[in-house]
Image (cartoon, rainbow, N blue to C red):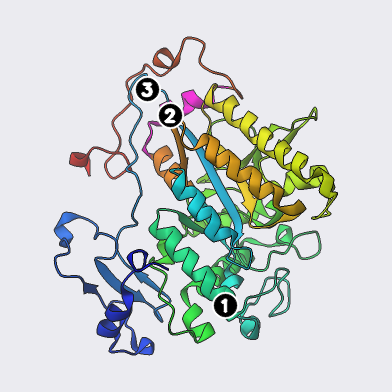
């Protein structure tokens, strides 16, 4: 990775830990000369280094490139939010994680990467994973090797420094009626979440890899949302997530309407959009388009690859313009770093990013940025927005529809005026 993109942690680790990672203290802090003091707010990224635990992660200051959420002014048209999110994010030989990081940067976008915790757990340490209702060391997506872990760590570091969000897709990806996540209790979900956190926070101890830099964030604070495997087990997961302080869930299916909170979490479900050539709509996820085209065959008829990719791209774009020209409901899109049907869905997603993310009044954001914005709004404004149906624009225009004077933001809420904080 380029020197300008890396956190200069090597020297700081040596200073803070006396050249011994095993001796790192959780509260050791190194501040760079000239860094702003605490009285000036959260430290800038890279201005402070505080290793956490065994040094797998570290607090390095506020995350860069996070916009400050602002309340809509009376009569102001809401922006069109689009969230591109990735299930089981990891870097492998296909290099899709690194590719879409670059696509995002080139098109003024940030994204959410749902990391599978076992992607940071080496095969030889698989028994450290104790999945609910399964024997230790079991995983339906396997584990990783040293090269895969190192490559994934690099992408996670760079993604976070570029303003992207690191969520979780949990660990073993168990689906189906036989001990799948749909059968897990609240306590079993809490165990799965705790292990996902642990694998991220302890990769250094679990791998013995000493040359790799820490992840530049506190994962206990970074982790605020998830999407469950195969969208199963949501009922008990949400209960566990609420108890653990999560802020959102994206494990459901919804229409293109403005989101609301359910059981204390923002329901940021993926949505149904037009499916070109069909009378029914399709979920905004590559896997679902694939199943609707080639069934469970991940490599179907090569003669149809281009058509299938165009079909997904056009369906997502129809959904986008339906919202952009209509109710402005956030569009939530889910994907996998996979080359199903010749990589046609990766092409489709990239073409959508390039078409929509540079348009006026469009914000391609992470789920974190979206919930920050939602939390900053007057609840009455959000309730008004939720009264709009799919694709419905206000008949009298936005200025009239949202003309009411919003209540001031409560103290401490994102978007509150500085003198209220």
Residue 205 vertical placement versus 399 (above, below):
below
Q: What element does badge 3 sit on?
A: loop
Q: For the C terminus, which image quadrant?
A: top left
Q: Does residue 377 belong to the magenta stretch?
A: yes
Q: Are marks 1 and 2 in contact (CB under 8 Å)?
A: no
Q: Position of residue 113 (x, y in %)?
A: 53, 56
Q: Position of residue 107 (x, y in %)?
A: 46, 43
Residue 385 vertical placement versus 249 (above, below):
above
| C-alpha gap between disc 1 and disc 2 | 41 Å
Alpha-carbon neighbours of circle 1 within 10 Å: few (<14), some, or many (≥20)? few
Q: What element does badge 1 sit on?
A: helix
Query: In the picture provided, is 141 more to the left or to the right than 361?
Result: right
Q: Which residue corresponds to the image point at 77% horizontal and 47% vertical from the top-left?
A: 290
Range drawn in magenta: 376-388
Q: Which residue corresponds to the image point at 73% horizontal and 78% vertical from the top-left?
A: 135
**Considering only order in the chain, which callout, 2 or 3, is on the residue closer to the N terminus?**
3
Residue assigned mark 3: 76
- Tell me the number on the disc at residue 360: 2
Q: Does residue 80 belong to the magenta stretch?
A: no
- Tell me the number on the disc at residue 147: 1
User: Is residue 165 something that shows in the picture?
Assistant: yes
Q: Position of residue 336 (x, y in %)?
A: 65, 55
Alpha-carbon neighbours of circle 2 within 10 Å: few (<14), some, or many (≥20)? few
Quarter where residue 30 is shown: bottom left
| C-alpha gap between disc 3 and disc 2 | 14 Å
**Considering only order in the chain, which callout, 3 or 1, is on the residue closer to the N terminus?**
3
User: Is residue 168 something that shows in the picture?
Assistant: no
Residue 103 vertical placement versus 129 (above, below):
above
Q: Position of residue 418 (x, y in %)?
A: 21, 41
Magenta stretch: helix, strand or loop mostly: helix
Q: For the N terminus, which image quadrant?
A: bottom left
Furthest toward the top, the residue is 396
């Amino acid at each position: 990775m380029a020197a300008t993109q890396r956190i200069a942690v090597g020297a700081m680790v040596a200073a803070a830990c006396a050249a011994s990672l095993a001796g790192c203290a959780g509260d050791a802090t190194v501040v760079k000369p000239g860094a702003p003091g605490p009285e000036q707010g959260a430290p800038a990224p890279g201005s402070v280094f505080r290793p956490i635990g065994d040094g797998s992660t570290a607090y390095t200051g506020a995350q860069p490139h996070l916009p400050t959420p602002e309340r809509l002014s009376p009569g102001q048209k809401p922006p069109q939010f689009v969230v591109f999110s990735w299930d089981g994010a990891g870097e492998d030989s296909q290099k899709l994680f690194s590719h879409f990081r670059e696509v995002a940067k080139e098109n003024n976008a940030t994204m959410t990467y749902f990391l599978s915790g076992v992607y940071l757990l080496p095969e030889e340490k698989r028994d450290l994973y104790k999945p609910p209702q399964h024997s230790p060391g079991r995983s339906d997506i396997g584990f990783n090797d040293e090269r895969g872990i190192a490559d994934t760590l690099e992408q996670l570091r760079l993604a976070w420094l570029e303003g992207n969000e690191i969520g979780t897709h949990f660990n073993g990806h168990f689906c189906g009626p036989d001990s799948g996540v749909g059968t897990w209790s609240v306590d079993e979900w809490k165990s799965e979440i705790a292990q996902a956190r642990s694998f991220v926070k302890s990769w250094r101890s679990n791998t013995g890899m000493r040359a790799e830099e820490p992840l530049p964030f506190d994962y206990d604070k970074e982790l605020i949302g998830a999407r469950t495997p195969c969208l199963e087990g949501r009922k008990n997961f949400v209960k566990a997530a609420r108890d653990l302080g999560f802020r959102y869930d994206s494990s459901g299916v919804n229409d293109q309407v403005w989101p609301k909170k359910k059981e204390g979490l923002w329901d940021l479900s993926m949505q149904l959009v037009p499916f070109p050539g069909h009378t029914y709509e399709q979920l905004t996820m590559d896997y679902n388009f694939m199943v609707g085209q080639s069934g469970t065959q991940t490599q179907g008829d090569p003669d149809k690859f281009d058509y299938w990719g165009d079909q997904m791209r056009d369906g997502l774009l129809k959904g986008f313009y339906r919202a952009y020209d209509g109710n402005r409901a956030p569009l939530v899109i889910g994907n996998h770093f996979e080359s199903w049907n010749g990589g046609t869905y990766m092409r489709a997603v990239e073409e959508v990013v390039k078409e929509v993310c540079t348009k006026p009044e469009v914000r391609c954001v992470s789920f974190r940025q979206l919930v920050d914005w939602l939390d900053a709004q007057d609840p009455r404004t959000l309730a008004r927005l939720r009264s709009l149906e799919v694709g419905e624009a206000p008949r009298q225009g936005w200025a009239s529809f949202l003309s009411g004077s919003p209540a001031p933001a409560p103290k401490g809420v994102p978007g509150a005026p500085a003198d209220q904080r």
